[in-house]
Each structure stands twice: as structure tokens, then as C-alpha cells.
Image (cartoon, rainbow, N blue to C red):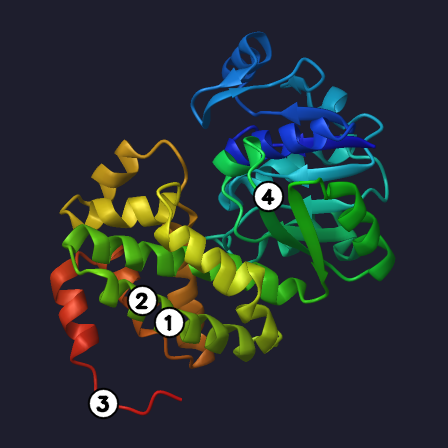
Amino acid sequence: MKVAILGNGGFGTAMSLALSRIGHQVALWGHDAVYTAHIAASRQNPRYLEGVVLPDAIRVSNDAAAVLERAQVVLVAVPTQHVRSVATAVRAFVPAGVPLVSLAKGLEQTSGARPSQVLGEVFGEPGRVYALSGPSHAEEIAREQPTTVVVAGADPAVLQSLQSALQTPWFRVYRNHDLLGIELCVALKNVMALAAGIADGLGCGDNAKAAILTRGLVEMQRFGLAQGADARTFFGLAGVGDLAVTAFSRHGRNRAFGERIGRGETLAQALAASPKVAEGVWTSRVVVAAARTLGVEMPIATAVARVLFEDLSPKLAVRELMERDQKAEA
């Protein structure tokens, strides 16, 4: 199968390696012409996936028309805030009817839209858009460490086709029809991972982190149910699975970003020091605004947004969460 991957960050690069190894013809596109040329020449991506060598079989190019030519599936692996602009720029080169699979994990800041909604708007065909997610750090996918993910979308036949095409001996793929829930899970878990990182930076300990993840999952599900998502999705790979790996792993960029904030860095300082995008930063503000509109209580997400954008002290945020009114767990 001819697979085109838009975005040569860590996840896009790791997926190009995984799919090339099982015989797919893979073409990898990047928006930065100079850096993409460096990857093509050196066969390495030190900015986003250090220590991994790309085989010559993977075509690396800044030429979107060439990368997308005769593609049978397109993976969109750019940050959420760039999905619309990239999709608009390459739309004319994407073959008609080809499935579009979003790998983005966030909500668009200007509209609050999920990545699949953005792609559906740009291409005018929401039904051809799918999403792939789950506990899947690029560093481990690239090194063939066992990884399990889920692909979601509307058409059962296409879902099964994607499941078969994307699975490898060390990259297992499940399928799910709850596209809404899958995308909300992977957007919201980044916000909770920021909270976990802030707690790490403050030195709060394992008890605090476990509580953040447990109550954070409650907030995630509450927000999803208010929009019509399937409750079961939040206890699957894209929900509790991705939440756990993002909040605990040394590879978790949102956790690491939160840790910087917990140690005293400002938002501007943390952004300047982090070359990789922490999607949860922007998602937190979108989620809190949407939760307010929906009438959904999300104290942890709200605390994260206030720390990032309203200069609330992380220590005071923890204190306020601990001193909230007593209530039943369920």
C-alpha cells in the first residue's frame, strides 16, 4: 500500500518506520523545507526522534504533490493547531476518496473543533476521516517495542481495512466506532498529564498523581458524555491507556511541560525550552471554555488553565483542589 504521512515530527516519523518495515511504500512530508531536506540526506530526525535511522525506502520530501501522488491512505501527523492550514495547503493533491487518518491529539484553539472535524470541513467529506490513538510514544514505536492503539471512524469496512493495513507484529490495532470519544479522550488526557507534571514539579508524590489521574478520568468522561461520547471509550486505550502512559512516562511531553511549570517556570519560559509541542497547553483553555458552556464541572482542568494563563500559583492550585467541598465519590 502507498502510505503518505503529513508531518515529520516524532509520531509521523515513527509511523513511517513501522509501516515501511512491513512492506508499505511510505512517503513522509514535512513543512520545513530545510529541515526536511536534512532528514532526507542524513536519514535521521534528531529534533524529534533522536537516535533512529530511516531506511532509504522511506521517501522524505517537502513536495506535497509528490508525497501524496497515488496515496491509498493519508496519515495526518501535524500538531492540532496546524491541521487546518496544512490540510488546506495540500487538499488539491490528495487523491479522491482516500481515507484520512488523524494522529493529532488536541482541540483547535480558534474553534474548539476536533482534528477529524477540521479535516471533514476542509475536504468536505467527514465520512472519510478517521483517527488513530492510544498509548503510543514515538520513541517506542520506532524501536519496535510492543504498542497497542485504536483506530476509530464511521465505515466498518474501511475501519477493518485500516486495522489490517496499519497493524504490524509489534503494533497492534483495535477498532472503535466512537470517533468523538476517541478524540476527546486523547485531547483531554494531555490536560490531565499537565496536571500530573505540575504535581511532579512540586514534589507532591505518587499519592497525589494517582488521585489526579483517577479524578481526571472522571472529568474526561463527564465532558465526553455531555457531548454524546460512549462512556466505555474512556476506559479503553485512548482513555485510561493513553492517560496513564502520558502522565507517568519520561517520554510524556505534556507531563514534562507540566513539571517545568511546577518547578517555577512561566508559560513563556516553558514554551521556549520545549521544542516538542505540548498539545495540552492550548487544549486546556478550549476545554475549560467548552465545559463552562456545557455546564460540566472540571476542577482539575480549570486549575491547569488558570495556572497556565491566569498566573495562579501551582501550590495555591493544589491547595484549592484539596479544600473543595466534601462530596461522595460517585
Q: Amino acid at mark 2?
A: Ala
**Pointer 3: what residue?**
326
Vertical comparison of 134 with 32: above or below: below
Lower sequence index among marks 4 and 2? 4
Residue at screen point 69% across, 51% down: 173
Q: Nearer the viewer, mark 3 or mark 2?
A: 2
**Pointer 4: what residue?**
84
- Distance from disc 4 to disc 3, alpha carbons, whole Å, reads 43 Å
Mark seen at residue 214? 1
- Distance from disc 3 to disc 2, alpha carbons, whole Å, reads 19 Å
**Pointer 2: what residue?**
210
Q: Amino acid at mark 1?
A: Thr
Vertical comparison of 323 with 209: above or below: below
Q: Is residue 112 visible?
A: no
Q: Is residue 328 left or right of residue 83?
A: left
Q: Are marks 4 and 3 in contact (CB under 8 Å)?
A: no
